[in-house]
């Protein structure tokens, strides 16, 4: 099943790139072909960690964004991950609307997943409601409660935004927290999650228990992803 996964949330610092990287590693470990696109002009976080699978694109350029759809012409059965930078929802929505892309992907047999990665703050909840209002019943919605960026999602659970999302059949999932020291070391050395688990000899390798923590965290992430239409 081909899918396109827009990993968004609109807000900065909620863990969009970590989610995209974990999903990329899930595809790699399961032998699932995919192409990644990184829309962050300043950090290119996704591209730094998975350069063999991802390339940068400019969101406010139709020429750049069109490359995402062109990937399916080369390989119609693959999956695509688009790591969306903060504050890209407006140009993305306009690009999708101008070409009726939800309908086009449906004709192509490509599942469209809009991921809303969020912390436990009020603005993340409000942005979820705005996402549902923008796209309605066309795509799948994946609401990600990122426990690496929050501990209590009561605002989401009690929100009208969640009710609207559930009315559209949204998948509401929890992304577990990876120990802070492990994540800092991985990010500091631009290490893929695969290398973090298997590298024992280089100067930037993790310790035995750190590798085990990453392995356990990935396993828990994979259990979440296995229940989604990816």
Image (spheres, grey):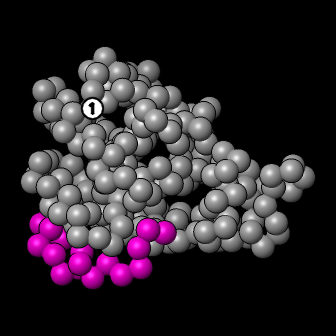
Residue visible at 27% across and 44% down in the picture: 87
Can residue 42 be seen at all in this image of the molecule?
yes
Which residue is under mark 1?
Answer: 108
**Secondary structure found at label 1:** helix
Q: Name the side, left or right, on which 191 lies relative to 141.
A: right
In the rendered image of this protein, does residue 131 appear above or below residue 177?
Answer: above
Can residue 31 be seen at all in this image of the molecule?
no
Q: Name the side, left or right, on which 164 lies relative to 173.
A: left
**Range of magenta residues:** 148-170
Residue reaching furthest top?
A: 63
Give the quarter of the image for residue 93.
Answer: top left
Of the 4 image quadrants, the one containing the N terminus is top left
Foreground of the two, 87 or 7:
87
Crowd around label 1: few <14 · some 14–19 · many ≥20 (10 Å): some
Residue reaching furthest right?
A: 201
Residue visible at 58% across and 50% down in the picture: 25
Foreground of the two, 177 or 187:
187
Where does the image place residue 38, in percent across and percent down from the top left?
Answer: 45, 35
Where does the image place residue 77, in percent across and percent down from the top left?
Answer: 42, 34
Give the quarter of the image for residue 207.
Answer: bottom right
Q: Name the side, left or right, on which 210 lies relative to 35.
A: right
Where does the image place residue 224, in percent across and percent down from the top left?
Answer: 46, 67
Where does the image place residue 171, in percent across and percent down from the top left?
Answer: 29, 65
Q: Name the side, left or right, on which 55 lies relative to 227.
A: right
Residue visible at 67% across and 55% down in the picture: 186
Residue visible at 18% across and 81% down in the picture: 158
Give the quarter of the image for residue 50.
Answer: top right
Residue reaching furthest front?
A: 42
In the rendered image of this protein, does residue 110 appear above or below residue 216?
Answer: above
């Amino acid at each position: 099943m081909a899918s396109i996964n827009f990993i968004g949330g609109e807000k900065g610092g909620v863990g969009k790139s970590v989610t995209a990287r974990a999903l990329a590693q899930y595809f790699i470990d399961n032998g699932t072909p995919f192409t990644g696109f990184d829309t962050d002009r300043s950090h290119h976080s996704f591209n730094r960690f998975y350069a063999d699978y991802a390339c940068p694109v400019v969101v406010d350029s139709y020429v750049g964004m069109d490359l995402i759809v062109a990937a399916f012409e080369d390989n119609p059965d693959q999956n695509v991950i688009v790591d969306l930078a903060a504050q890209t929802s407006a140009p993305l929505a306009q690009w999708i609307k101008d070409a009726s892309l939800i309908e086009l992907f449906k004709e192509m047999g490509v599942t469209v997943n809009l991921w809303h990665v969020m912390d436990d703050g009020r603005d993340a909840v409000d942005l979820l409601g705005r996402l549902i209002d923008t796209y309605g019943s066309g795509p799948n919605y994946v609401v990600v409660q990122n426990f690496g960026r929050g501990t209590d999602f009561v605002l989401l659970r009690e929100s009208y935004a969640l009710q609207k999302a559930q009315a559209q059949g949204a998948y509401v999932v929890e992304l577990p927290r990876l120990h802070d020291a492990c994540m800092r070391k991985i990010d500091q050395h631009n290490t893929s999650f695969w290398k973090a688990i298997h590298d024992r000899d280089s100067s930037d390798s993790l310790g035995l228990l750190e590798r085990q923590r990453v392995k356990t965290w990935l396993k828990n992430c994979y259990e979440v992803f296995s229940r989604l239409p990816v």
